Amino acid sequence: DEEKKFKGQKKKSYLECCERCVGSLPWASLIATILLYMGVALFCGCGHEALSGTVTILQNYFEVIRAPGETLDVFTIIDILKYIIYGLAAGFFVFGVLLLVEGFFTTGAIRDLYGEFKVSACGRCLTAFLMFLAYLFFLVWLGVTAFTSLPVFMYFNVWSMCQNTSLVEGANLCLDLRQFGAVTISEERKLCTGSEKFFKMCESNELDLTFHLFVCTLAGAGAAVIAMVHFLMALAANWGYLKDASRMQKYEDIKSKEEQELHDIHSTRSKERLNAYT
């Protein structure tokens, strides 16, 4: 019987420990962090490969060459976009860690609301600052999503032309890079449906793969936008809880101070009565 009691108490302690651990996790911040990392990884990885595929298509089928020197051409812009992708990957990894750590500390503050934990003004300011950053990055990712939809639209048009070329006989459609701003007005880089290079491009894997990579890039940017919305909701809730916790702490301090003053008054009166009686 004693052994069964011991096993039951041990099992109960394990369950209580698991419940305590699960209850202390900031699930909202954790889910938002996972979604943010997935979106940023999808955006950066697929975006990098899609830009590399775009370079291959421009060089192999449109015969666009890199300008000599430090001239700002389409290849230089693509290189700049790649460096921006590297910066986004590193920056949002750190930002996600900061938001997750803030979620852990805030969850601890709420859990120990009626304990000895004191909610500081610094913690509330940090939460408000992270909320401002999350809102700013939400707007940034909205712009990135809108910008990423442009190459998806362009490649969809090219892909549709490749799919419908065999259906429309005698159609002579051309892709001119000057319309997309990829080359200067003086350069003529056309690729028409009747040419051999156009059929080679449509039959190659570069076009199909690059198009789908840009679609995945757009999906990653959308996931990052949703993650920012999750972080905004979690940070706003945490800031409200911390503000209420601060007010509760002030109320408890005032209440304990008044009780101490009442106790001191009663003690003083009791001593005065005792002295008067003696």
Image (cartoon, rainbow, N blue to C red):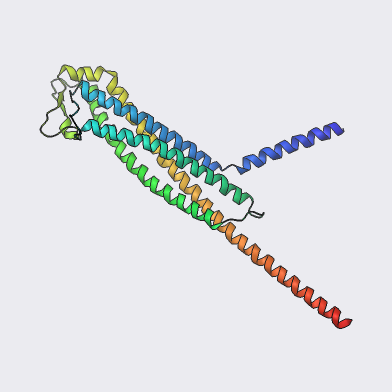
Residue at the extreme left of the image, as rendered: 186
Measured along the vertical axis of the image, is residue 259 above or below residue 215? below
Q: In which quarter of the image is residue 152?
A: top left
The residue drawn where x is 39% and y is 34% is: 220
In the image, residue 83 lies at what x, y percent? 33, 34
Q: Quadrant of residue 56?
A: top left
In the image, residue 93 lies at what x, y percent? 45, 38
Judge left or right: residue 137 versus residue 247.
Answer: left
Measured along the vertical axis of the image, is residue 46 above or below residue 137? above
The residue drawn where x is 66% and y is 40% is: 19
The residue drawn where x is 64% and y is 40% is: 21
In the image, residue 159 lies at what x, y percent? 25, 25
Could one spot residue 239 in this view of the protein? Answer: yes
Could one spot residue 223 in this view of the protein? Answer: no
Instruction: Locate the N terminus by quadrant.
Output: top right
In this rendering, the count of numbered labels is 0
Measured along the vertical axis of the image, is residue 143 above or below residue 70? below
